[in-house]
Image (tube, rainbow, N blue to C red):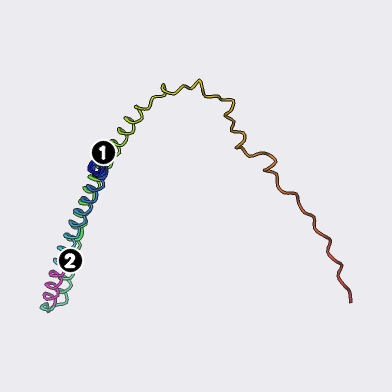
C-alpha cells in the first residue's frame, strides 16, 4: 500500500519535477552564456585598453573607442537574443507540460464524475416541506438601525 501511494504521488508530481528540471537547465544555460560573455568582454576590454595605450593619435583612439563600443553592442544584442530564445523555448516546454497535466486532470475528474450515479438516490423521499432556507435569511427587523438618542440641552453659560 505504501509503495502504491508513493508511486501515485510520484506520478502526480511528475509535471512539477519536469518543470523544475526545465527551469534548472534553462538557468544553467543562461548562467553559462553570461559567464562566457563576461569573460569575452573582460578580455576584449583589456585588449582595447592595450590598443588605446599604444595609440598615438587622438583621432585613432576615438575610432578605436567607436569600433569597440559597436562591437560590444553587437555582442550584447546577440547574447540577449540567444537568452530570449532559450527563455522562450523553456516557456514552450513548460506550457506543454502544464497543458498536458491539466488535460489529464480534467479527464480523470470526468472519469470520476461519470462514476457518480444519481439513479442510486431515491429523490422522491426527499421532503421539500422541511427544506426551508427562510430561517437563514436576515429579517427586516434586524436590518433596522438603532433608535437615535436625544441630546441633553447644554447648560447655560455663566456670565460674569
Secondary structure state at the residue bearing disc 2: helix
Query: Does residue 86 sit above or below 130 in this rendering?
Result: below
**Distance of mark 1 from mark 2, alpha carbons?**
38 Å
Q: Nearer the viewer, residue 72 or 127?
A: 127
Secondary structure state at the residue bearing disc 1: helix
- According to the picture, the residue beneath numbered tag 2 turns out to be 38
- Residue 80 picture location, percent across and down: 21, 57
Query: Does residue 30 sit above or below 60 in this rendering?
Result: above
- According to the picture, the residue beneath numbered tag 1 turns out to be 100
- Residue 58 falls in which quadrant of the image? bottom left
Query: Is there any visible trace of residue 96 in the rendered image?
Result: no
- Magenta segment includes 47: yes
Outermost residue to the right: 160
**Start-end of magenta stretch:** 40-52
Query: Does residue 39 sit above or below 10 in this rendering?
Result: below
- Residue 130 picture location, percent across and down: 58, 28
> What residue lies at 18% left-to-right and 70% top-to-bottom?
65
- Residue 51 falls in which quadrant of the image? bottom left
- Residue 133 picture location, percent across and down: 59, 33
**Left or right, residue 158 beside residue 10:** right
Label 1 CA crowd tier, 10 Å (few <14, some 14–19, many 20+): few
Q: Nearer the viewer, residue 141 or 42?
A: 141
**Left or right, residue 154 beside residue 118:** right
- Residue 126 picture location, percent across and down: 52, 24
> What residue lies at 13% left-to-right and 66% top-to-bottom?
40
Earlier residue among tags 1 and 2: 2
Query: Does residue 49 sit above or below 136 in this rendering?
Result: below
Q: Quadrant of the N terminus?
A: top left
- Residue 56 falls in which quadrant of the image? bottom left
Amino acid at each position: 500500500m505504501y509503495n502504491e501511494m508513493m508511486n501515485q504521488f510520484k506520478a502526480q508530481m511528475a509535471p512539477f519535477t519536469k518543470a523544475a528540471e526545465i527551469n534548472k537547465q534553462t538557468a544553467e544555460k543562461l548562467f553559462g552564456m553570461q559567464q562566457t560573455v563576461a569573460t569575452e568582454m573582460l578580455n576584449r576590454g583589456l585588449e582595447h585598453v592595450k590598443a588605446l595605450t599604444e595609440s598615438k593619435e587622438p583621432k585613432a583612439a576615438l575610432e578605436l573607442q567607436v569600433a569597440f563600443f559597436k562591437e560590444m553592442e553587437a555582442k550584447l544584442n546577440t547574447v540577449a537574443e540567444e537568452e530570449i530564445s532559450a527563455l522562450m523555448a523553456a516557456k514552450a516546454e513548460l506550457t506543454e507540460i502544464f497543458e498536458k497535466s491539466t488535460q489529464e486532470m480534467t479527464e480523470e475528474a470526468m472519469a470520476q464524475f461519470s462514476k457518480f450515479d444519481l439513479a442510486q438516490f431515491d429523490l422522491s423521499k426527499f421532503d421539500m416541506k422541511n427544506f426551508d432556507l427562510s430561517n437563514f435569511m436576515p429579517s427586516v427587523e434586524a436590518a433596522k438601525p438603532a433608535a437615535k438618542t436625544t441630546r441633553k440641552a447644554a447648560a447655560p453659560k455663566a456670565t460674569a
